[in-house]
Amino acid sequence: MNIPIEVNTNKTDLNQISSEIQKNIDLAIQKSPTGGNSKPFACNWKDNEIHITYSAQLAKHYLNRNDHTSYISLGCLIKSIEVAASKFELLSIVNLSEDKLNARIKFQKQNTSMHISNLFDSLMSRSTYRGKFKKSSNKNLRSQTVQHRQAEISIDYQFNQSLTKKFKKYLTQSESYMWLQVCALKDFISEIRFFSHLSSQQQRGISSYELGISIVDQALLFLLKPAPLVLSFIRRVPILNFPMLQNSSRVLKNSNFCLFRTKELNPLSLIAVGEVAMQTWLEIESQGFKAQPMSLATIPIIDAKAGMLPDDTKEQFKKLYSESGIQVINEQFSLRTDLKIVWMFRFGTAE
């Protein structure tokens, strides 16, 4: 299946891609986010093409039911490669496999510059920010609906001063999913590399230093790693849970949000959302902001729609993700509530 990402008739075939261009595209691949820090995609050059291969084993984590985050991550990867290639006036041509999880990307020379080439610097400096934000102003970010290949996608911004109490409460409730669902907690802890340096782009998992929590909480997670039931119990007791709630409150303070919705939740639509979200992320960063995906607040909604929530999901979370959470989000984000929720970022000016 051939999916041209950009169409421009002013193009010529390539004889060979230089090592400099390959190096920059490889850097872009490393900078692309992957669901749950699982690094499930391997990218290899064959002649002038990049072959993307998918590992279902690596992709197993607590937020990847039915490969939903893998499709979004593939869209992010495709867009990252496209941005890097455009820097050198190359057009990316994508061929997806039947399962939509493996791909080949070939390149054609264009004699004109593409508009996304100015996002290259933002891509090279991109990172997932988990810290606190300070007050910031709206820097010309506007909600809109875009047509991306077969998918209609809405990009809806809400700024901190407009956030409702119900929406903030929902975010806190969704964050607790990871702690109160013991199986999800086990999977999450297994993804953490405790007391290591900042995450390597090549390494699976997340460094405990990047969780945005105190060193005391990191130590607590490490010591109680073999006893997830104890961690879950702590999350239920108000006095013991107070430091975690404080941290959640600090994370929400001064945060702005960007929501992505689409008409369908099929693989091609999720890949398209990943592409649009990646470009939006880079546009946000090009304006001086930092961003963090809020996957716990959105991905389980996709799972609930598909009937893919884990069998042990507690009733409070079944209702949260299949009913009340959707209503709260649609009340907060007024643009295109007829579309289905897919993914959301928080963003702002880093402290």
Image (cartoon, grey):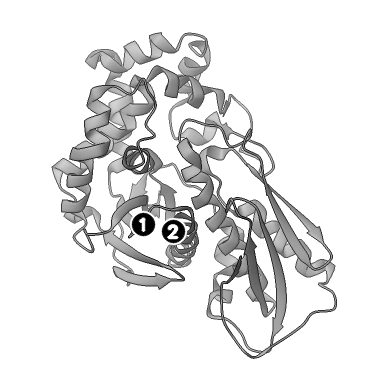
How far apart are the alpha carbons under marks 2 and 1? 6 Å
Count of marks overlaid on the render: 2
Check disc 1 and give the amino acid type: Glu
Q: Quadrant of the N terminus?
A: bottom right
Residue, disc 1: 264
287 is higher (above) or lower (below) than 167:
below
Q: Nearer the viewer, residue 40 or 136?
A: 40
- Identified at 32% across, 70% down, the residue is 145
Q: Which mark is residue 182?
A: none
Q: Quadrant of residue 147?
A: bottom left
In x, y percent, where is residue 121?
59, 67
User: Does 50 sit left or right of 152 as displayed?
Assistant: right
Q: Residues within 10 Å of mark 2 (few under 14, many from 20)?
A: many
- Identified at 47% across, 30% down, the residue is 62
160 is higher (above) or lower (below) than 169:
below
Sequence order check, earlier mark of 2 and 1? 1
Q: Nearer the viewer, residue 3 or 26?
A: 3
In x, y percent, where is residue 61?
52, 31
User: Does 15 sit left or right of 333 as displayed?
Assistant: right
User: Does 88 sit left or right of 299 as displayed?
Assistant: right
Q: Which mark is residue 269?
A: 2
Check disc 2 and give the amino acid type: Ser
Q: Nearer the viewer, residue 212 or 103?
A: 103
Secondary structure under the numbered disc 2 in the rendered image? helix
Q: Nearer the viewer, residue 326 or 347?
A: 326
In x, y percent, where is residue 38?
59, 38
Q: Residues within 10 Å of mark 1 (few under 14, many from 20)?
A: some
Label 2 close to label 1 by CB (< 8 Å)? yes
Secondary structure under the numbered disc 1 in the rendered image? loop
In x, y percent, where is residue 117?
58, 75
